[in-house]
């Protein structure tokens, strides 16, 4: 679930934003589709590189003998799981939380801010979170949901991911 979604989103991101459009013959002035702006591509490439590096570091901390990274960035989550089959419950939860957080990050990097709405606000439980790009945080719309300064409460993706994976674990525990 979490892994598949994270891998899927990473693959999409790579395909959509980092593959240079093919240049046809001609002088390049007619009938060409508009290239995506280069800075966006570079930002996405940086994002993918940072995501892979984080997974590699975390995996090697738990499994120093882990082999080389897979060639395709989207395969890193499977690689991480395959190399860390014997983690205790807490470590599995931590791993899945990182993967889920990266999945959210990939969606947001692709411009899909709606993924935030699938999470209840950790402060008040309402379903009114939205993404504020400038702050890189989710913000609650509930006017009563404020911090000690009276400002709307905001949440980092890692916090939403933590709550999401903890909730999943609880549901699974209750089902058995
Ligand atoms: Zn709230």
Image: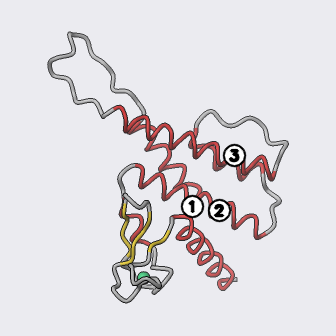
Does 29 sit left or right of 67 as displayed? Answer: left
Residue behind mark 1: 100
Assign the C terminus to one quadrant of the image.
Answer: bottom right
* Distance of label 2 from label 3 (alpha carbons): 13 Å
The image quadrant where one finds ligand 1 is bottom left
Question: Regarding mark 1 in the picture, which secondary structure is present there?
Answer: helix
Counting the numbered discs, the total is: 3
Q: Residues within 10 Å of mark 1 (few under 14, many from 20)?
A: many
* Distance of label 3 from label 1 (alpha carbons): 15 Å
Colouring used for the render: secondary structure
Residue behind mark 2: 96
The circle drawn on residue 59 is: none
Residue 91 lies in what quarter of the image?
bottom right
Q: Residues within 10 Å of mark 3 (few under 14, many from 20)?
A: some
Question: Regarding mark 2 in the picture, which secondary structure is present there?
Answer: helix
Question: Regarding mark 3 in the picture, which secondary structure is present there?
Answer: helix
Return the x and y of residue 146 as percentages of the image width and height. 42, 84
Residue behind mark 3: 79
Location of residue 161 with respect to 38 vertically, above or below: below
* Contact flag, marks 3 and 1 (Cβ < 8 Å): no
* Distance of label 1 from label 2 (alpha carbons): 6 Å
Return the x and y of residue 67 as percentages of the image width and height. 78, 37
Front residue of this view, candidates 103 and 44: 44
């Amino acid at each position: 679930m979490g892994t598949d979604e994270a891998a899927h989103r990473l693959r999409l991101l790579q395909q959509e934003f980092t593959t240079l459009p093919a240049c046809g013959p001609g002088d390049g002035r007619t009938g060409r589709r508009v290239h995506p702006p280069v800075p966006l591509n570079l930002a996405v490439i940086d994002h993918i590189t940072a995501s892979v590096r984080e997974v590699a570091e975390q995996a090697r901390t738990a499994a120093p003998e882990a082999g080389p990274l897979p060639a395709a960035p989207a395969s890193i989550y499977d690689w991480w799981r395959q190399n860390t089959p014997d983690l205790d419950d807490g470590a599995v939860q931590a791993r899945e939380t990182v993967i889920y957080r990266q999945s959210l990050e990939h969606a947001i990097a692709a411009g899909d801010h709606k993924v935030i709405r699938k999470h209840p606000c950790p402060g008040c439980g309402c379903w009114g979170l939205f993404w504020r790009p400038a702050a890189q945080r989710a913000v609650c719309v509930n006017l009563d949901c404020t911090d000690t300064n009276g400002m709307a409460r905001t949440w980092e993706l890692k916090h939403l991911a933590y709550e999401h994976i903890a909730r999943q674990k609880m549901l699974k525990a209750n089902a058995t």
